[in-house]
Image (cartoon, rainbow, N blue to C red):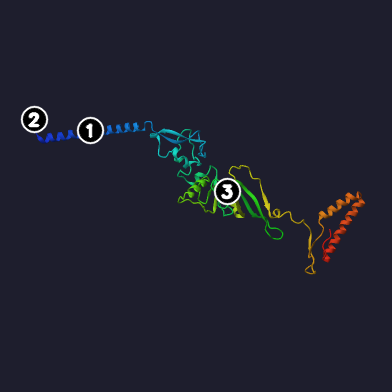
Amino acid sequence: MLKKIKIHSIIGNPWVVLVIAVLVAGLLTLWIYRFLSGREAALKEQLAAQLNEGRRVAVVVPVRNAAPGTVIDGNGFAAREIPADLVYEDMILASSFDKVANLRLVRQVRQGQPVRRADVEALQSRDFSDLLKPGKRAFTIEVDMVNSTAKMLKPGNHVDLFLISSTSPTAAGTDKQTARLLMSDMLVLATGQDVRPRDYGEAMAAQAAEGAEGVDTNPDYDSLTLMVSPEQAARLALAQKVGSLRAVLRNAADKTATPQIAVSEHALFAGGDEAAIEYIVGGRSAGANMISKLPTAQDIGNAISSALANGGSMGGSAGGIAQAQQGAVANAANAMAGRPASR
């Protein structure tokens, strides 16, 4: 038969009382800890709200909806004060506006929304391909000191491209050079590996004047990367094989299409002596005229026109023609004799 456990005997056991006391103390400690933690968090939030109440921070916002490619300047952007607790670390503060001035947006920013670092080119961690517009390609050409306008070309500049190539061989077997406009108003994406926009020039010059370290005031590059269409890329690839390219700087604000230009060596040196039939007479002394000229077709034509104007009849015309023929024979005789040709 089981013995009945007496309540007073359990309560009278000191070990049982000790265990109960420890459990109660633990539960009480846990409750107090949670209560105090919640109270502390509430006090912190209340204190932060009191500190931020009335404290506002000025950030950069667009005054109207800004599309990608919009230049950040004082006309389209302004400072807006917002509560300090709503300011994120990557927002552009109004006090830092000079650091982003003249840069471009890479994504749309709605009116009144703070501009963030990821919205601004050169501040966004991205790839070079992000600079290309949809449907465009990047094509690199080699340049030198002369072909790069004395290394003064900057990303963002616009250039015209001329192709200098050889035409078909002439009868004498020599090639003639021709320069022709290949493409007009091409955007320079990069000079070498530098993709900084051209507006950085003034800032770099100012930093160099202040003695700032790490400022490259004499950039050295031997290539230009242009933004082209796929068809233009194919033309440039072929042009590099058949001749040499020359980049000519133009004003970025000049949107006038450059007319088609083609200049050959013949046209370059045009305007010299009139064309004439030349022949060499041998067997004369060194001081004699070794090369002389027969009358040109223009000379004979002028003589005929003069004869027709003066003669007024068929007889006069015949006389003028005969006179021109006699002059040609006389010039030939003078040339054979080493005498100057008569006019």
- Residue drawn where x is 16% and y is 35% of the image: 22
Q: Which residue is mark 3?
A: 233
SS under mark 1: helix
Numbered label attached to residue 327: none
Q: Which residue is mark 1?
A: 32
Q: Which residue is mark 2?
A: 8
- x, y percent for residue 277: 79, 59
* Residue 165 placement, left or right of 339: left
* Residue 31 placement, left or right of 337: left
- Residue drawn where x is 65% and y is 50% of the image: 180
- Residue drawn where x is 44% and y is 39% of the image: 95
Can you say whether 192 is above or below 6 in the image?
below
Quadrant into which the C terminus falls: bottom right
- Work out how far the residue at label 3 is from the one at label 1, CA to CA, in angstroms: 75 Å
- Residue drawn where x is 64% and y is 54% of the image: 165
The amino acid marked with disc number 3 is Ala
